[in-house]
Image: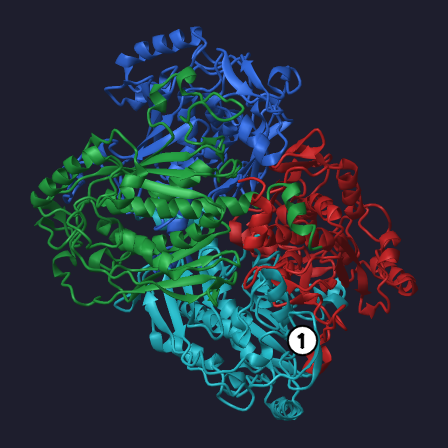
Chain colours: A cyan, B red, C blue, D green
């Protein structure tokens, strides 16, 4: 349940304020150059505390590789990576110890398990996504060798939509904005809501380029439904839309992508037909709810069933979609690698390619 | 890849115009009364050819149970169900034999596998969803015993949105319309587009009531991300949104569901917090693209790479969302049953409940 | 639970005297020529009623392919095969309806599930192994293309051990005997015990030749532990030994297989080191208990807890190891194919071999 | 591939002389008291360096829990445990860097992956089994609450068989001997072979008492075939036999366990019928080959294909079966817990027991 993938399969562990969080990736092919700087750089993209648009909490997110790499090369054995929590004991959680924060998983964890590590959200904290980024970094090292590129950025904040999709601009934007002309409006919106002790939702766009045709295993391990599973598993994500997010309002004539010798004439499908990549860019949108951690008074109950007027304290992201875009990108990377590996096994031709030299 | 679920796990097989399609369900608990009339009734809801809003193809969809049931009771062994195709040889597929229909999986199956059963779409045909409805029917027999109810209906067609969600009305509507006042408008829209040899997209709403708290296994087998996987695996589905589909435009204050002793004061979350059911109704929307099978001329290529001006013939649904609502309901049922079974194993308390009588 | 394998994964269904038994194989690579005569020929090897050393029951074991094959070639979609039971209603099971046959699964199925299809053993009947042979036949079609050969035969019956391992002789022996000089002794032993209304145990040897180095995925999906799982899952199998079955009595010096440029100087390891094939023949022994169905009076109880002096009637194999050798061979084939497919994904080199043409 | 189990599922990672080895256990039920002393005590049973019958290497095997436990109670989230390697850099592996030790996995890892962490055997080292014992300790905490007991001991060394099975004696024997009268003979045999720079094989017996009827999920996740998979996955194990290891030489009349109201009159079946526990003791034997690490000269080749006369140096167990008995016990524990959890979901009756209070 804490694992994702079939061949390239990772398992995460750890609580927000426990000793450590981490990930074990099974099924990493042998022979990949493991660039630790690249991995740490990926971690740093998601890391909090970098600017006023993310939580002011300081977390180092320093990754340590414990296994699976020898002399800088993957050996084919599980790669485990750990991020130790430096200041796990420093905070005071007395105010949320017994109470269920609205919009959070406190209530459901308590009633499901009968016990809850309340420190910083425990297992349900978005801090778990750091482990996903570490796994995604390994996946990207494989994709890099095949020239497959995954880009992401924020396409909508607080109901204000971007008019452009400039992934190059997004890379260097503090809020991963896809549209330089809307970026300032968004920043002001975030500032305003932050000062009101409130929060904002948003939409992330992901685009994957240079994929081979054939990724995705019908009927229940399609490229699109597994991307959907991957995205909706991310904290605060409520939805996904593959391809043109207006498709359900269009007619068949408008929505079908006609085909020529060289290319598809449009890409409403988001690069996926029948659950299989068609060689065009894979594109989709991911919908994030507003951060549930706000600093206004809210009605709730505690674990004894008593009603409370509750005010949260602490430091939190005014909008999770921003850092969420990196997580969406990382989860996309692991899905694509898993699909690449599975697809290798799907034809006698590929079997011959691999074994004719060896058997 | 053709299986879904962890404990209550089903595998489908079969091509649109092969000998048969079918499903094998593993993990069905022993001791369920298997009502064959109920199963056939579920099949009939999805069955084509009933009115002018669905394809005029006649398919009986008569289910035959081959195993797993003894004297009307499930035995705990796999239940296999088969639907034989009566008139598999009658049609002429010469016009699509070598050509890739725009918006269909013809192109991707061909390039992935190097071979394609072109008869009626083969494996990628929506006919496969009949097998899902059969599996869903078994799941519903379990849910019925626990008083868990799953309802569905159409909430939007061609960009026109319902203003009500009347699931009782939907049950008896020819197009499973959730709003009696919009139903007629929708029917006219469908008629118009059908006569123009075009098609329409739409949105389906699913609502699951009377769930226990605690369903969903974080972090990668959450209730919501598995529902997302289940829904997006359905033919023509491009997206899903859990809970209030405006959440990404709201603030935290607006979106959080406050809690009192008796209930949540709102249900923007769609009944899921941290991936676990909170006891409120689980609600979500499913976005269907327009039927790709239209009868207007379109540009495409054939398997030899030659460009064609292609005109499809035959009988097809003017809108797949309508019959799709039944499939969405069925897939929801299998997800919920799987989550019920998994959740049983998650506490020492439950272990004691089960084994204290026996060990 | 009724599935086996990771990529090449099959699921069986059906009860001994239900409507049908069958198998669905997922993960079959596209592009395999499916020779139905070969498949039926494999089925016939296991089929009962051919001579006096097997049960006199007549079962046709005629396989019908329902899906996954188009114009004689596998399409990459699930291959389902069904064997209908012709005379499912003809027998009278009143004498075993409520009683638990010693050595059979009647007792455990009843107490596990609270219900039991008592007709011919229901799901626990060795008839289920026909579905395994069908799956194994598809696997062998792949192995044939790679020149990998699986042979089997009987090496011990009733404590009398063969002195030779002549797999060519075994192929044409009525009892799959590996030693022509012991065959007659064994036949007489079987005849004697059969006439005494008793039964015999035995040992089967399997040998797999021409394997590439590298099959097997450490640590828990090793070639040897998955072969062990496959073998012990066969009805009446109580044990397995990989390589020289005296290894536990030897010293390291005696047991280690020394290595030269050309070959290993011995094969005590059974061709597997660290769970991975070393290129030498993979060899192992499989231990079958005597058929529990005997016709002498035995003490038992019925489902009401009452003690009975029970005498079984009907037709049964005097020794299951004989027909079991074919099942062991079939299960070996599916394990090897699964390992071949998994191993393809384990190095960056293989990834490049497959995708350099395509991406 | 580095994971074991379906619900109670653990994944191990780490190389013999890497930074750390460890395990992540998913599916641990919430509400278990996690006694760290008990866990460490289990580790210490397997730990090397305690007496002259095991390797003289000193490894602390000090377990650190990183997640999944809060205030001493399991929370239902993954429990990860790490054992850091203290002196990972101290040894000199130059003599085995390029050479393939006979009887070891060096050869197969090299040819499978194209790279090999040669330090102490890397991933293929028996040191990995420490992580299994940690997982087994958590499993035993669950079994303890249900009064299920797992015992093990050595029943044969160097071909000399015990005449008694005294599991209480074995607990305190330096070599886990099941027979006090043979213990001294065995010790002398080990001493002799150790001094000859040779090694010995042996047989371990495991006995599991007080199991409920019903554990094991036919047809491919039976209690016996999964125990077989678990056992043969242990380093140096070549075989397993369930129940009376002479069954294949017996007749049906001799081998069948007759049944009375109170009990089975014998236990040749080893407590398993049709793959399901029958309530009697589950018993099986596990066959270990002699330690391949011997200090006599052997022929081998290096990774350049050159032949070598090779002499290993270092410290190694003269017989792996001794410490292996603890690993067999641990693997048995995780199998039983997984089967307990799966079995909970197999009847409508159990579903009602769990949900009648909650839904």
Q: Is residue D148 left or right of residue C85?
A: left
Q: Chain ID for label 1?
A: A
Number of numbered discs on residues: 1
Q: Vertical placement of C48 versus C247: above or below?
A: above
- Considering depth in this image, is C203 or D134 the residue closer to the camera? D134
Residue A86 pos. (x, y %):
40, 80
Q: Is residue A95 left or right of residue B251?
A: left
Q: Quadrant of residue C249?
A: top left
- Residue at 41% across, 46% down: D333
Residue A279 pos. (x, y %):
54, 63
Q: Vertical placement of B209 versus C69: above or below?
A: below
- Considering depth in this image, is B98 or B262 the residue closer to the camera? B262
Q: Residues within 10 Å of mark 1 (few under 14, many from 20)?
A: many
Residue D32 pos. (x, y %):
49, 57
Q: Quadrant of residue B32?
A: top right
Q: Which residue is mark 1?
A: A102
Describe the element under mark 1 as helix, strand or loop. Answer: loop
Q: Is residue D4 left or right of residue C302?
A: left
Q: Quadrant of the C terminus of chain C?
A: bottom left
User: Taking the image as drawn, is residue C76 in sight?
Assistant: no
User: Taking the image as drawn, is residue A223 in sight?
Assistant: yes
Q: Is residue A168 left or right of residue C287?
A: right
- Residue at 44% across, 81% down: A44
Q: Vertical placement of C322 versus A125: above or below?
A: above
- Residue at 49% across, 79% down: A46
- Considering depth in this image, is B130 or C192 the residue closer to the camera? C192
């Amino acid at each position: 349940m804490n694992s994702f993938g079939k061949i390239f399969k990772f398992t995460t562990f750890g609580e927000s304020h426990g000793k450590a969080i981490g990930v074990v990736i099974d099924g990493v092919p042998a022979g990949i150059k493991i660039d630790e700087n690249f991995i740490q750089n990926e971690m740093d993209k998601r890391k909090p505390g970098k600017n006023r648009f993310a939580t002011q909490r300081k977390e180092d997110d320093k990754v340590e590789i414990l296994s699976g790499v020898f002399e800088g090369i993957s050996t084919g054995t599980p790669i485990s990576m750990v991020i130790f929590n430096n200041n796990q004991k420093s905070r005071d959680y007395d105010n949320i110890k017994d109470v269920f924060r609205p919009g959070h998983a406190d209530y459901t964890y308590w009633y499901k398990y009968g016990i809850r590590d309340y420190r910083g959200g425990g297992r349900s904290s978005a801090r778990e996504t750091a482990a996903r980024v570490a796994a995604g970094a390994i996946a990207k090292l494989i994709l890099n060798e095949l020239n497959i590129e995954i880009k992401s950025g924020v396409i909508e904040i607080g109901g204000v939509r971007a008019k452009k999709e400039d992934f190059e601009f997004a890379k260097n934007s503090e809020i991963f904005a896809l549209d330089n002309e809307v970026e300032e409006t968004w920043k002001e919106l975030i500032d305003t809501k932050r000062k009101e002790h409130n929060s904002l939702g948003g939409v992330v766009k992901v685009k994957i380029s240079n994929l081979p045709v054939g990724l995705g295993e019908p009927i229940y391990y399609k490229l699109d439904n597994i991307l959907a599973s991957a995205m909706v598993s991310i904290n605060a994500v409520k939805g996904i839309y593959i391809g043109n997010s207006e498709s359900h309002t269009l007619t068949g004539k408008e929505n079908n992508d006609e085909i020529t010798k060289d290319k598809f004439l449009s890409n409403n499908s988001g690069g996926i037909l029948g659950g299989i990549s068609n060689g065009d860019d894979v594109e989709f949108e991911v919908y994030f709810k507003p951060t549930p951690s706000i600093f206004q008074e809210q009605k709730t109950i505690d674990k004894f069933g008593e009603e409370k007027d509750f005010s949260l304290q602490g430091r939190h992201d005014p909008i999770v979609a921003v850092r969420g875009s990196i997580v969406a990108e990382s989860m996309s990377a692991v899905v694509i690698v898993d699909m690449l590996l599975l697809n290798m096994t799907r034809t006698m031709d590929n079997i011959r390619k691999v074994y004719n030299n060896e058997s």
